[in-house]
Amino acid sequence: MTILISWVAPIAVLFTFWITKTPLSHLGFRLPSSHIFNVTPLLYTIANISVLLYILVLATAAILFRLYPKLKKGYVAKIPSIFIPLLPRNSSERRLWIVLSLTAGITEEILFRGYLFFIIPLLFKTTTLWPAAILSTTLFAIGHLYQKWEALKPLVVGALFTFIYYSTGSLLWIVILHTLQDAFAVGMLREESQRDSLKGDDTP
């Protein structure tokens, strides 16, 4: 049900683009290029390097957690209790989590990056993209307020994704990064029982 609900707004946006015959490229469905928003080659290069570093960090963490189980247990032990009910508890839920990760990666980026960067300049009749960038990052963080203080992390990640989208003009990289970030939790945060076992280990 969550997956279906998450598609309602994006489908409405896509339908609007279809009936108005607006190219989906205006929504970010295009290959990365520095010419889309006319950014400098340096900024475009930094954005692409940021993508590679982000993927490298996730891959390194996955490898380290596999090689050093205690490191992973220590990480799991620090998970705020608010997240525990959200974690997949079995293989079926883990598969569903992967689908949800892909869904979130696509739907949230369509709304928070693609659509806002398209509609804000039209509404305010401006060529500057700063209002769209600020609103995109802010709304992305607000959408994660259920995480309480942990929402600061989505704020930082949202700012990075906004920078990458602005610099490349494409949803490609940020959809991939968003999906990998969410799917990363499948391997790292497998079961609530892990948390319970850690508590048991601490018992004298």
Image (cartoon, grey):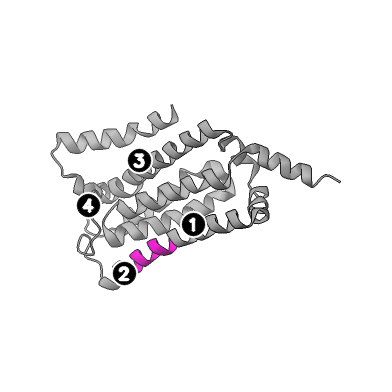
- Vertical relation: 192 (above or below) 135: above
- Give the magenta range: 46-54
Disc 1 from disc 3: Cα separation: 22 Å
The residue at the point 42 percent across, 57 percent down is 159
Quarter holding the N terminus is: top left
How crowded pointer 1 is (Cα within 10 Å; few <14, some 14-19, many 20+) is rated as some
Could you say which is closer to the camera, residue 72 or residue 47?
Answer: 72
Judge from the rendering whether residue 23 lies leftward or rightward of residue 1; answer left or right.
Answer: left
How crowded pointer 3 is (Cα within 10 Å; few <14, some 14-19, many 20+) is rated as many
Residue furthest right in the image: 204
- Vertical relation: 2 (above or below) 62: above
Which picture quadrant has residue 169?
bottom left
Q: Which residue is mark 4?
A: 30
Q: Which amino acid, by three-letter code, is at mark 4? A: Arg
Q: Which residue is mark 3?
A: 107
Q: What SS does tag 4 mark? A: loop
**What percent of the width, then of the height, locates residue 109?**
35, 46
- Give me the disc on residue 45: 2
Disc 4 from disc 1: Cα separation: 25 Å
Q: Which residue is mark 1?
A: 58
Q: Which amino acid, by three-letter code, is at mark 1? A: Leu
Q: What SS does tag 3 mark? A: helix
Disc 3 from disc 2: Cα separation: 26 Å
Q: What SS does tag 2 mark? A: helix
The answer to whether any part of residue 24 appears in the image is yes
